[in-house]
Image (cartoon, grey):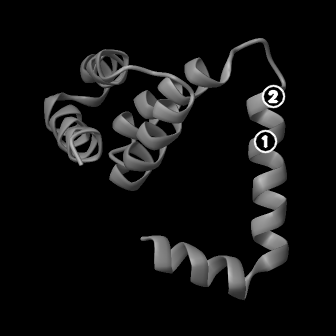
Amino acid sequence: MPKLLDDFKKDFPDTWQAYEKLKDACDQEGPLDTKTVELIKIGISTAMEHQGGVFAHVSQARKAGATSEEIYHAILLATGLAGFPAALAAFASAKEHLES
């Protein structure tokens, strides 16, 4: 996926810049700290069955100080809404990132 993302940024720089501005504004608008924001995004990515998002936000959560246990808990919290198969796939993506 990183090459695809790089290609998108190159082919549509204005769109990417607008997306980044919106994302950053949403992230910074409220009182939640970066670690909490990233843990929420892990849960959302799990529920949406978006493994690329899980992988990306696990990375960002780690940079923000989240522990493996907190990351796994964020995925576990999504299980009731997303279903076991979606959570299991997210656990696999997270584990791959955390153990590499």
At x 74%, y 45%, the residue is: 23
> Which residue carries the number 1 mark?
24
Label tally: 2
* Mark 1 crowdedness (10 Å alpha carbons): few <14, some 14-19, many ≥20: few
Q: Is residue 77 left or right of residue 84?
A: right
The local crowd at label 2, few if under 14, some if 14 to 19, many if 20 or more residues have their Cα within 10 Å, is: few
Q: Residue at x 53, y 34 (%)?
A: 63
Instruction: Locate the N terminus and report the quarter of the image it occupies.
Output: bottom left
Q: Nearer the viewer, residue 43 or 69?
A: 69
Which residue is located at x 41 percent, y 38 percent? 58
Does residue 21 appear left or right of residue 65 in this picture? right
- At a point 47% along the width and 71% down the height, the residue shown is 2
Callouts 1 and 2 close, C-beta under 8 Å? yes
Q: Amino acid at mark 1?
A: Asp
Which of the two residues, 97 or 51, is positioned nearer the viewer here? 97
In the rendered image, residue 93, in percent from the top left (x then y), is placed at 25, 46
Q: Quadrant of residue 30?
A: top right
Q: In the rendering, at what x and y percent does residue 80 appear? A: 26, 17
- Numbered disc 1: secondary structure: helix
Residue situated in front as seen by the camera: 89 or 69:
69
Using residue 53 as the reference point, say whether residue 49 is left or right of it.
left
Q: Quadrant of residue 35?
A: top right
Mark 2 — residue?
28
Q: 2 left or right of 78?
A: right
